[in-house]
Image (cartoon, rainbow, N blue to C red):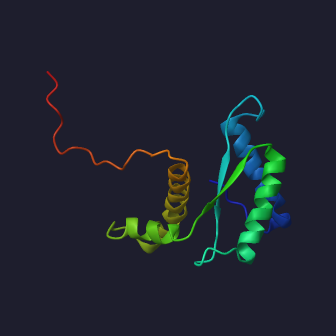
Amino acid sequence: MVDVQIAHGQGSALLEAIARIAVEQLGEDPKREQGELVMGMPLNMDGSEGPRAKIVRSFGDRLALRTGRAIHMQDERLTSVEANWRMAGSGMTHKQKKAKRDSLAAAAILRDFLESKGIRPEEDTEAPSESPGWG
């Protein structure tokens, strides 16, 4: 988790924090080690780009230059709504839900990106009520 305000230093602190994590997770040399980054794109409900989307796109361009990695923008509309729906009836407090919402929305963004590339992430499965009879 990156906990840096985007506005701090015109986004440079956030840019460096993400670049550092990209190196930790993907390696230093994008030519030798595979890995790309996915960012949520805050589109308007009609699919157009508003001022916030332009800021995110600009930040993504800066991140691509800084890391040498491909950056993919994925529509993030309704991912927070999906996260709220997934937590409904969970028994979590409002504070607990707020803390988890961004993680669930980020997972939805990544899932949607993978599905747009024809990759089907494993479905959520619940553990069977009884363990299978192993010998």
Is there any visible trace of residue 6 in the rendered image?
A: no
Q: Is residue 95 above or below residue 16?
A: below
Q: Quadrant of residue 45?
A: bottom right
Does residue 13 sit above or below 54 in this rendering? above
Q: Residue at x 39, y 65 (%)?
A: 86
The answer to whether residue 76 is seen in the rendering is yes
Q: Is residue 123 left or right of residue 100?
A: left
Q: Residue at 77% of width from left, 69% of height from top?
A: 55
Image location (x, y in percent) of residue 24:
70, 38
In depth, the one of 32 and 24 nearer the eye is: 32
Residue 100 x/y as whole percent: 49, 62
From the top left corner, tell me how far across and down residue 30 is, in percent: 76, 35
Q: Nearer the viewer, residue 1 or 58?
A: 58
> Residue at (62%, 77%) from the top-left corner?
44
Total tally of numbered discs in the picture: 0
Q: Is 112 displayed left or right of 26 in the figure?
A: left
Image location (x, y in percent) of residue 38: 64, 52
Q: Residue at x 78, y 61 (%)?
A: 59
Q: Is residue 114 left or right of residue 43?
A: left
Residue at the top extreme, as displayed: 135
Quadrant assignment for the C terminus: top left
